[in-house]
Image (tube, helix red, strand yellow):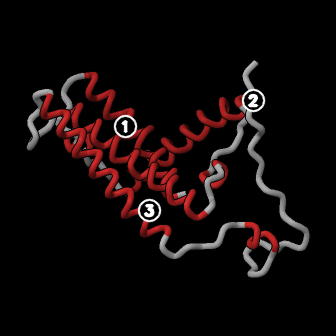
Amino acid sequence: MPSVPPPLRRPERPEGAVPGRRGSALLDALPPFRWWAAPAAIALGLTLGSIGDIIVTIIGAAGGANVSHPGPAVNIAGDIVFDLGFVAAAIYIARLIGWADPSGFGFRRFVLGRVLWMLPLAAAVYFTATAAYASLLDLHGSEQLPTGLGRPSDTAAMIGVGVFVTVIAPIAEEFFFR
């Protein structure tokens, strides 16, 4: 029988702890703030992402892709690897400062039933608010992101761009900035 990991729990507030107040037991329980952590994570993420993107470009060139104008597959793969460089940097820096707990990155257990009704509700609110905003400001621009990823013209490339733009990139970005 596989072992089940214990549920993630928010640490209980120690007695007498006041959120945000220096010297409180709650702040004393957290790892100390390191001024260098954010700049180091950004620099490391850019470095890892760039190296990974170069490796993807080399592999693409070996497979026959044009280096100066790579196709959608090479562009999307390079962007995914670039984002993974930032995720790796965030995990590494978090481990260095002693904050490698998954809850520090926002991971929580969830109730599936609640998610199944809240997700469509959140999507409906988002799209309604976006449509109202666009009509209020008379916005009718066209999105340029798909062309920036290599002018995908076939269905598979458009699906890849869609998955990257709506799933992979937002998750990597949220993970890094948390």
- Left/right placement of residue 60 relative to residue 158 reads left
Pick the front one: 97 or 45: 97
- Are dots 3 and 2 in contact, CB under 8 Å? no
SS under mark 2: loop
Disc number for residue 41:
3
Q: Which residue is mark 2?
A: 4
Sequence-wise, which precedes: disc 3 or disc 2? 2
Question: Quick one: label 3, few (<14), some, or many (20+) residues within 10 Å?
Answer: many
The amino acid type, in three-letter code, at marker 2 is: Val
Real-space Cα separation, disc 3 to disc 1, in angstroms: 22 Å
**Residue at 32 percent of width and 50 percent of height:** 49
Pick the front one: 137 or 116: 116
- Left/right placement of residue 93 relative to residue 22 reads left
SS under mark 1: helix
The amino acid type, in three-letter code, at marker 3 is: Ala
Real-space Cα separation, disc 3 to disc 2, in angstroms: 32 Å
**Up/down of 85 relative to 34, above or below:** above
Number of numbered discs: 3
Disc number for residue 164:
1
**Residue at 35 percent of width and 40 percent of height:** 80
Which corner quadrant holds the C terminus? bottom right
Q: Answer with the quarter of the image where residue 53 lies.
A: top left
Which residue lies most toward the top here? 1
Camera-near label (3 vs 1) is 3
- Left/right placement of residue 97 relative to residue 131 reads right
